[in-house]
C-alpha cells in the first residue's frame, strides 16, 4: 500500500506508472455479475440477509464444489462473509485466545499475522524456502508446535509466491495438525487461478479443514467485498453467532450479484481471463529470467512471481524504491511478506497487458544498466 500510494503521487504529477504491485485483477467484474447486482439494487434487495448468507448463494457455492470438484458439501457448512478477510476473522475468533499460537509461512500474506494478533494470539512465522516451494509441511508442524499452538494457516495458491500445495501435502499437514489437537486453515482465495495443473481444493484431501475462499480474485469482484468459508459442521453454530456479532451479514447486493458468478456464461468469461493471465505469467517469467532475476519455485497459481534479485541488488527494498522513483515501475519488496530471507525478493503482479509488461521490462533493464 505504501508503494501504491507513492505510485499514485507520481501519477498525479503526470508520470506514466506501470503497476506490478497491486494484488488485484485488472479485469472488470464480468457483465452478468454487474447486471445481477444492479437488478438487486433496483428491486430493493438492500436489507440484511441471514448472518450466514443468502440460502440461495450458499446452495450455489455448494453446487460449485459439486460441479467443479465432485464434492457434496452441505450448504449448512458454508458461511458467506465480507471478503475472505471476514472469513479469516471468524475462524480465528473461534480458535484463538490470549497467547494462542498460529503457525504461518514466512514469506506469507502479512495481514494474516495481524489478524492473529487482533485476537491476542501470537503469530509464529515459520521460515520456508524453495525446498518446500515456500509452503509449510508436516515436518514444520512437528518442529514448531507446542502446548499453546492451536492452528496452522496455509495458502494454496499462495501469496506472494504463487505456489500450490499438492493433495498429499495437504493430507499430511492435516494429519500432523489433527494429531496435535489443532486445526488446519487453508486459504484458497486464488483457487481457480491455477496453471499447468487441475483445479483442486483442500476439501478433496481432507474434510475436516477450514477452507477460506473469495469472490475477489478468480471471480474478479474485489470491491464487492464478498467471500466464504467452509467449516467442520460442529463449528458452524458458533461461527454463525460470531458473524452476527462481528458484522451482522455480508453486503446484500453483492450476495445477489454473486449468484450470477456461477452461470455458464460467466464461467466462460472467467476461463478466458485465466488463460490470459497464464500467458502473462509465462511472458513475464521469461522477461525476468533474461534480466537475471531468479524464480526459485514455479508459480502455478494466483498472479504473482516471487523473484530473487540478489545477483542484481541484494537490497530488494532499495531496488523497488529506485525502480519507482527513476523508472515509474511499481513492484512490491519482499520485506512486506516476511523477515526470513525476503530482503532480496520482489513480488511482481502480472496484472498488466503483455505490451505493458514489455515496457516495464525495458525500464527495469535501463535501471540495471545504470547500476547503483
Image (tube, rainbow, N blue to C red):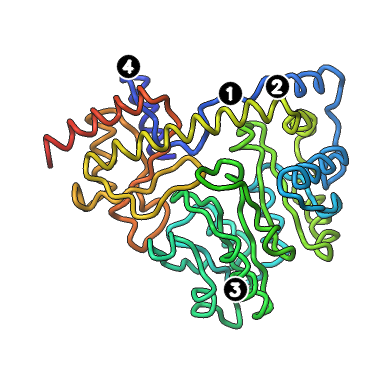
* Gap in angstroms between the C-alphas marked 4 and 1: 24 Å
The residue positioned 51% from the left and 27% from the top of the image is 26
Residue under label 4: 14
Task: Please indicate whether residue 227 sits to the left or right of residue 157 in the image.
Answer: right
The residue positioned 73% from the left and 28% from the top of the image is 264
Q: Which mark is residue 99?
A: 3
Q: Between 354 and 98, which is closer to the camera in this rendering?
A: 354
* Gap in angstroms between the C-alphas marked 2 and 4: 32 Å
* Residue 14 position in % (x across, y down): 32, 16
* Residue 347 position in % (x across, y down): 38, 45
For the residues labelled 2 and 4, say whether their Cβ atoms are less than 8 Å apart: no
Which quarter of the image is occupied by the C terminus?
A: top left
* Gap in angstroms between the C-alphas marked 3 and 4: 49 Å
Q: Earlier in the sequence, mark 3 or mark 2?
A: 2
Q: Which mark is residue 89?
A: none
Q: Which one is in front in this view, the residue at disc 1 or the one at disc 3? A: 1
313 lies above or below 367: below
Residue under label 1: 28
Q: Which one is in front in this view, the residue at disc 3 or the one at disc 2? A: 2
For the residues labelled 1 and 2, say whether their Cβ atoms are less than 8 Å apart: yes
Q: Which mark is residue 34?
A: 2
**Local SS, label 4:** loop
Amino acid at each position: 500500500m505504501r508503494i501504491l500510494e507513492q505510485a499514485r503521487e507520481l501519477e498525479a504529477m503526470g508520470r506514466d506508472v506501470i503497476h506490478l504491485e497491486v494484488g488485484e485483477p485488472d479485469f472488470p467484474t464480468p457483465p452478468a455479475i454487474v447486471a445481477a447486482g444492479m437488478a438487486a439494487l433496483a428491486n430493493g434487495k438492500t436489507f440484511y440477509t441471514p448472518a450466514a448468507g443468502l440460502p440461495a448463494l450458499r446452495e450455489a457455492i455448494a453446487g460449485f464444489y459439486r460441479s467443479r470438484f465432485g464434492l457434496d458439501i452441505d450448504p449448512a457448512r458454508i458461511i458467506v462473509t465480507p471478503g475472505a478477510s471476514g472469513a479469516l476473522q471468524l475462524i480465528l475468533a473461534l480458535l484463538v485466545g490470549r497467547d494462542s499460537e498460529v503457525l504461518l509461512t514466512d514469506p506469507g500474506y502479512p495481514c494474516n499475522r495481524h489478524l492473529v494478533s487482533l485476537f491476542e494470539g501470537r503469530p509464529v512465522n515459520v521460515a520456508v524456502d524453495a525446498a518446500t516451494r515456500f509452503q509449510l509441511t508436516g515436518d514444520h508442524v512437528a518442529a514448531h508446535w507446542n502446548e499453546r499452538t492451536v492452528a496452522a494457516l496455509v495458502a494454496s495458491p499462495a501469496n506472494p509466491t504463487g505456489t500450490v500445495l499438492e493433495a498429499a501435502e495437504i493430507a499430511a499437514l492435516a494429519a500432523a495438525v489433527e494429531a496435535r489437537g489443532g486445526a488446519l486453515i487453508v486459504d484458497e482465495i486464488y483457487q481457480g487461478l491455477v496453471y499447468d495443473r487441475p483445479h483442486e481444493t483442500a476439501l478433496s484431501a481432507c474434510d475436516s479443514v477450514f477452507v477460506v475462499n473469495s469472490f475477489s480474485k478468480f471471480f474478479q469482484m474485489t470491491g464487492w467485498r464478498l467471500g466464504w468459508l467452509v467449516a467442520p459442521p460442529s463449528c458452524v453454530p458458533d461461527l454463525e453467532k460470531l458473524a452476527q456479532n462481528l458484522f451482522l451479514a455480508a453486503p446484500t447486493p453483492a450476495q445477489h450479484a454473486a449468484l450470477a458468478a456461477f452461470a455458464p456464461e460467466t464461467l466462460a468469461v472467467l476461463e478466458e481471463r485465466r488463460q490470459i493471465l497464464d500467458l502473462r505469467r509465462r511472458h513475464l517469467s521469461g522477461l525476468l529470467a533474461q534480466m537475471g532475476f531468479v524464480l526459485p519455485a514455479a508459480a502455478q497459481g494466483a498472479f504473482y512471481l516471487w523473484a530473487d534479485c540478489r545477483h542484481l541488488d541484494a537490497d530488494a527494498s532499495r531496488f523497488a524504491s529506485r525502480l519507482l522513483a527513476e523508472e515509474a515501475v511499481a513492484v512490491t519488496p519482499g520485506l512486506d511478506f516476511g523477515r526470513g530471507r525476503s530482503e532480496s525478493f520482489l513480488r511482481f503482479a502480472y496484472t498488466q497487458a503483455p505490451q505493458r509488461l514489455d515496457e516495464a521490462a525495458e525500464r527495469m533493464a535501463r535501471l540495471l544498466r545504470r547500476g547503483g
